[in-house]
Amino acid sequence: MDINLEITPAEWQVMRVVWSLKQTTSSQIIEILQRKVDWKPATIKTLLRRLVDKKALSATRQGRGFIYQPLVAEQQTMDQAADNLFDNICERHVGCTLEHVISNATLSKEDIKNLQSILSTKLKDSPTQVKCNCIPGMKMDC
C-alpha cells in the first residue's frame, strides 16, 4: 500500500503511542503524553481528530469515548517520511545527509552490519559522482 501521509512532529508523538499500544483510548494517550510533553488534554484530542481525518487512525466509539487503532504501518510511514525528505533535497546532498543521520543515530551492531552489506552491494554499481538535480547553474556544496 502506497501512502502519502504528512504528519506533523506533534502528530508523530501521538502515532508513536498508538503504534506501541496497537489499540488505545484517548485517556491512555493523554496519560502517556502528559508525562513526556506539557500538552493539555484538548491539544491531544485535537491531534487525534486530525490523525483520524488524515486516515492515519481509526476511531471506534466505545461508551463515551473512542478506541484508536493505527490504519498505517509504523515502518512504512517512517519510510515514506524519509522518502519525502530525500525527494526534496539535491541528490548531491543525499550522501552527506545520510552521513549526518548515521553519525548521530544510535545503531545496533546488526543495524551496522546490514548497512555495510547494503553499501557494499550499492558500491558495485554506483556512479563516480551523483548528478545534481537542482536548478541549472546553481552550485551546491556538501
Image (tube, rainbow, N blue to C red):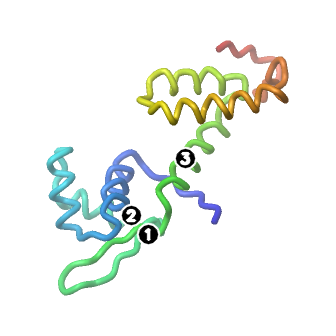
Q: Residue 82: name its quadrant.
A: top right
Residue 103: give x, y in percent of width and height: 49, 21
Q: Residue at x 46, y 52 (%)?
A: 7
Position of 136 relative to 18 (above/below): above
For the N terminus, the quadrant is bottom right
SS for dot 2: helix
Q: Which residue is mark 1?
A: 53
Position of 14 relative to 36 (above/below): below
Answer few, some or many: residues within 10 Å of disc 2's Cα (few below 14, many 20 plus, some between 14 and 19): some
Residue 20: give x, y in percent of width and height: 33, 58
Circles 2 and 1: CB atoms closer than 8 Å:
yes
Of the numbered discs in the image, which one, if any, rests on residue 14?
none
Of the numbered discs in the image, which one, if any, rests on residue 50?
2
Q: Residue furthest bottom?
A: 63
Residue type (three-letter) at the residue carrying disc 2: Arg
Q: Which residue is mark 3?
A: 81
Q: Residue at x 35, y 66 (%)?
A: 22
Residue situated in front as seen by the camera: 122 or 98: 122
CA distance for labels 2 and 1: 5 Å
Residue type (three-letter) at the residue carrying disc 1: Asp
CA distance for labels 3 and 2: 18 Å
Residue type (three-letter) at the residue carrying disc 3: Ala
Q: Residue at x 19, y 55 (%)?
A: 32
